[in-house]
């Protein structure tokens, strides 16, 4: 499996490298208040991709923290219920099995 992921990584690198080589022309990016930014197209795309990924991670952060807090609360509730029931965390012992009678 590691071999397949390595080959896939190499193929993706070659494709992205070829994309970068084909998109080296200069582009102008116009912002508000007459602010202008010049640079290669591939770098502009990369910068906006990274900015989008960072904003996506920031948008998910509250959800992740809320789920972690709820998981912790659920674990505490489970422990409280187990201690109230007196079972603890040990699994139940299996039932005894009688050996089968011998056929003669």
Image (tube, rainbow, N blue to C red):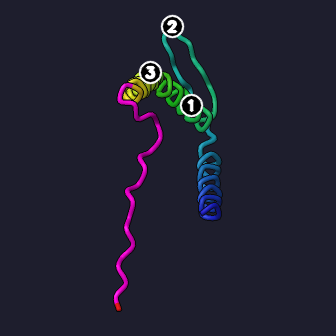
**Cα–Cα span, label 2 and label 3:** 43 Å
Q: Tell me the residue that label 1 is attached to.
A: 50
Residue at x 35%, y 30% (from the top left corner): 85
| Residue, disc 2 | 33
Neighbourhood count class around disc 2 (C-alpha, 10 Å): few under 14, some 14–19, many 20 upward: few
Helix, strand or loop under label 1 = helix
Q: Which quarter of the rendered picture does the C terminus lie within?
A: bottom left
Name which of mark 1 and mark 2 comes first in the sequence.
2
Which of marks 3 and 1 precedes in the sequence?
1
In the image shown, does 73 or 67 lie closer to the viewer? Answer: 73
- Between disc 1 and disc 2, the foreground one is 1
Vertical placement of 93 versus 42: above or below?
below
Q: Whole-Å distance between the Cαs marked 1 and 2?
A: 24 Å
Q: Which residue is mark 3?
A: 69
Find residue 7 and report its image quarter.
bottom right
The stretch in magenta equals 84-103
82 and 71: which is toward the camera: 82
- Report if residue 45 lies within the magenta region: no
- SS at circle 3: helix
């Amino acid at each position: 499996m590691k071999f397949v992921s390595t080959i896939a990584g190499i193929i993706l690198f070659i494709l992205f490298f070829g994309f970068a080589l084909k998109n080296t022309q200069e582009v102008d990016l116009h912002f508000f208040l007459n602010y202008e930014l010049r640079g290669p197209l591939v770098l502009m795309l990369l910068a906006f991709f990274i900015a989008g990924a960072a904003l996506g991670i920031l948008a998910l952060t509250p959800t992740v923290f809320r789920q972690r807090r709820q998981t912790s609360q659920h674990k505490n509730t489970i422990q409280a219920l187990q201690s109230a029931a007196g079972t603890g965390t040990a699994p139940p012992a299996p039932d005894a099995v009688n050996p089968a009678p011998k056929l003669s």
